[in-house]
Image (tube, grey):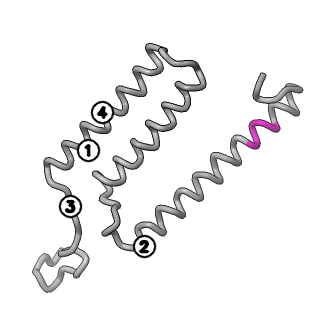
Amino acid sequence: MHDDTPTARTAHDSQASHGSVGSYTLGFALSALLTVAAFALVMRPVLSRELTLAAIVILAVVQIVVQMYYFLHLDRRSERWNFISLYFTILIVAILVGGSLWIMSHLAHDVMGMGIEG
């Protein structure tokens, strides 16, 4: 059985920062707004293709920051190991995405005789 007495809790449990209903609601509203903005940019193109792509990338980065701050509670007060694991995750994702794009580019060049540019 799980012992939930105060002596069984760790120091980390008492210092854990949890958001309030208001902060979760604000995070959700910001996330929804950013998603709707990206969707609107694609469905009603008012910018050039390159500017639309740049705007979507910027909105995606802002979305990541909002998610990390409001839902994962990663801010300057977070523990150091949280950031180390975050940086490691970013490194692994960058290696996977970069390697996949590199492989697909070479496959397109070798198999089709053309680059990704078409």
Marks 3 and 2 sit apart, C-alpha to C-alpha, by 18 Å
46 vs 93, left or right, is left
Verify whether residue 60 appears in magenta: no
Q: Which residue is mark 3?
A: 18
Local secondary structure at mark 2: helix
Mark positioned earlier in the residue sequence (4 or 1): 1
Q: In the depicted view, which residue is nearer to us: 19 or 46?
A: 46
Three-letter code for the amino acid on which mark 4 is drawn: Ala
Which residue does the image show at 41% across and 43% down from the upper left?
62
Residue 44 appears in the figure: yes
Mark number, residue 88: none
Indicate whether 14 appears above or below 58: below
**Would residue 28 appear left or right of 64 to someone viewing this image?**
left
Spatial CA span between label 4 and label 1: 9 Å
Q: Are marks 4 and 1 in contact (CB under 8 Å)?
A: no
From the viewer's perspective, is 58 left or right of 28?
Answer: right
Residue furthest out toward the bottom: 7
Label 3: state its secondary structure. Answer: loop
Residue beneath disc 2: 81
